[in-house]
Image (spheres, rainbow, N blue to C red):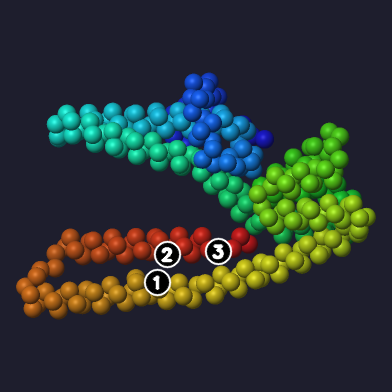
């Protein structure tokens, strides 16, 4: 497992932050309860840190950044408003920032887990085909695990690399398959590992088991593509209405109304409309990207 070097908003390396943040342990237990599965999520995100350490670093980072921003805003506001208003504004901004950083850092491991799931599921079918070809060629199952761990399949290879190391140090291969399946965030990989483990226990032909798994995943991906295609049709219609038709008709109506009412169309109005359209374009691309299946 790689060493954790940085955490967002943490002003120093993690090793030093662990030492300083120990004085926040009395608050860390309460903060960790906000995310009950924090310890499991940290393991799935491959972050080598326990939940108490991470929660205390979260509090330390949020406190440091909020105090820093609060001080900067207070100093700047002293040149604009009086002391009381500047103090109230800086406290309000600092408190909001404190809560926002805690919420973000508690959800940060989940973001890493989602990224790892996407990487694993994007490479899972190719990795299983890699193993299937090996098995059909007469290579033993464990040797195919070693080949997959060295195959450059990103997070998928990392999972099998850890499994291979555990087995080589004396662990039982079925126990390790069950352990990885329980701790893995990807439902497709979890189900595949359980099927492989059950196949080992029942003494089945592993090439047949792998072929069955590959067939099931291929069907699921085809269904996911069809669902994605069906979702694009209404999204495209909404995009055409909001980003093309309504702005064109809106500008035409503004020109007509301005000729009757004497209202002038300023450059600021047109720039505001252009900025709104750009924001809609950005939101639309985000929606399309979030719904795209991991293939």
User: Marks 3/1: CA distance?
Assistant: 17 Å
Asked if residue 269 is positioned above or below residue 66 in the image, the reply reads: below
User: Marks 1/2: CA distance?
Assistant: 7 Å
Looking at the rendering, in which quadrant would you find the N terminus? Answer: top right
* Mark 2 element type: helix
In depth, the one of 94 and 223 nearer the eye is 94
- Contact (CB < 8 A) between labels 3 and 1? no
58 horizontally vs 68: left or right: right
Residue found at x 36% / y 75%: 241
Residue linked to disc 1: 239
Residue found at x 66% / y 70%: 222
132 horizontally vs 265: left or right: right
Say if residue 138 shows up in the picture. Answer: no
Residue found at x 30% / y 75%: 246
Residue linked to disc 3: 292
Give whichever of discs 3 and 1 has the lower sequence position.
1
x and y, in percent, of residue 277 in the image: 31, 65
């Amino acid at each position: 497992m790689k060493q954790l070097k940085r955490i967002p908003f943490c002003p120093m390396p993690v090793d030093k932050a662990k030492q300083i943040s120990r004085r926040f342990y009395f608050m860390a237990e309460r903060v960790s309860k906000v995310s009950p599965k924090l310890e499991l999520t940290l393991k799935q995100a491959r972050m080598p840190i326990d939940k108490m350490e991470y929660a205390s670093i979260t509090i330390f980072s949020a406190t440091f950044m909020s105090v820093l921003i609060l001080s900067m805003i207070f100093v700047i506001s002293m040149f604009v408003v009086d002391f009381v208003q500047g103090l109230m504004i800086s406290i309000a901004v600092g408190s909001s920032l404190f809560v926002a950083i805690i919420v973000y850092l508690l959800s940060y491991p989940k973001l890493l887990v989602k990224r790892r799931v996407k990487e694993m599921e994007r490479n899972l079918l190719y990795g299983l085909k890699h193993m299937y070809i090996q098995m059909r060629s007469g290579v033993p199952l464990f040797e195919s695990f070693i080949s997959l761990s060295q195959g450059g399949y990103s997070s998928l290879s990392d999972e099998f690399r850890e499994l291979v190391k555990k087995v080589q140090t004396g662990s039982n291969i079925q126990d390790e398959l069950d352990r990885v399946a329980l701790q893995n965030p990807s439902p497709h990989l979890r189900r595949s590992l359980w099927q492989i483990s059950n196949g080992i226990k029942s003494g089945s032909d592993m090439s047949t088991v792998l072929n069955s798994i590959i067939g099931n995943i291929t069907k699921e991906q085809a269904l996911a593509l069809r669902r994605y295609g069906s979702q694009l049709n209404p999204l495209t219609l909404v995009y055409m209405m909001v980003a093309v038709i309504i702005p064109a008709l809106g500008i035409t109506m503004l020109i007509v109304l301005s000729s009757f009412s004497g209202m002038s169309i300023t450059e600021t109005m047109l720039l505001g409309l252009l900025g709104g359209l750009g924001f809609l374009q950005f939101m639309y691309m985000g929606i399309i990207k979030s719904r795209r299946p991991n293939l």
